[in-house]
Image (cartoon, rainbow, N blue to C red):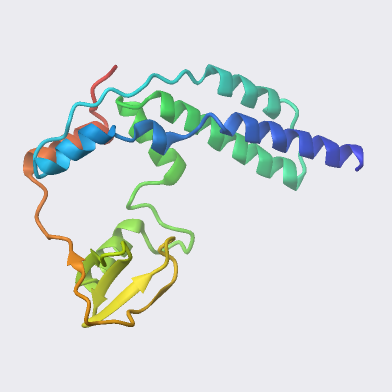
Amino acid sequence: MNKQNERISDLSHRLYQASREIRILSHIRWPTEIRETFFKQKEQRLPEVTYPHFEPSNVIMQIAGIQAELGESVVDNWLGRQANIIANSALMKSSVGTEQFYQYSKELYGAPSDPLTDGMSTSLALAHQFDDVIESIGVFADGTVVVQSARQLWVTDAELLNWQPAEDTNITPRWSSSEPVPLNLHEAITQQYRGNGPRP
């Protein structure tokens, strides 16, 4: 392995090590007891959840050291973009429960109304289209996700990537109920994740 490849390999390894501290979904996951209580109470009120504090300085310091060693090649530019993503993810994780969380999230993943890679579609428009096409969503007894569209049942794999017609249409799925989100819950979610969340 030549020196250039060794340098790229070392930077990639260090980026991976820095990213290991960034597990946002597990960080904001509600404890089991809170989740169960929320659903037992018919999702009427957003629970008060205290999230663990995350100090991002170690990740930011690692990323700064990596960025200082980046060159100007195509690979270096890609590594630089990944470094920025990891740094912003660390800052987002540290800002859970504050208005900055949504801003970092928007910067990383975009807003629902932002154009996707085709320059025309948006996540929000696709969600509306999905809602128009899908009549019902449910699960079979074995946990398989099933949807009903155009009077046909469709099942998917565990990754929700490959869909195919259900073979046994005599089994009745347990369908999800379609109920509007209570206004107070909708407002609480909006405040929590879109700019007015309580500060720690």
Q: Residue at point 27% right, 19% down?
A: 199
Q: Position of residue 174 (x, y in %)?
A: 18, 65
Q: Position of residue 191 (x, y in %)?
A: 20, 32
Q: Position of residue 165 (x, y in %)?
A: 34, 81
Considering depth in this image, is 7 or 69 the residue closer to the camera?
7
Q: Residue furthest front?
A: 142
* Number of marks: 0
Task: Tell me where residue 141 sits by quadrant.
Answer: bottom left
Q: Residue at point 65% right, 34% down?
A: 15
Task: Tell me where residue 52 sits by quadrant.
Answer: top left
On screen, residue 188 above or below 141: above
Q: Residue at point 42% right, 28% down?
A: 93
**Left or right, residue 43 beside residue 151:** left
Considering depth in this image, is 166 or 182 the residue closer to the camera?
166
Using the rendered image of the protein, determine whether residue 50 is visible from the camera's viewpoint. yes
Using the rendered image of the protein, determine whether residue 186 is visible from the camera's viewpoint. no
On screen, residue 161 above or below 167: above
Quadrant (top left/top right/bottom left/bottom right) for the N terminus: top right
**Left or right, residue 10 beside residue 151:** right
Q: Residue furthest right?
A: 2
Q: Residue at point 12% right, 39% down?
A: 185
Quadrant (top left/top right/bottom left/bottom right) for the C terminus: top left
Q: Position of residue 27 (x, y in %)?
A: 39, 31
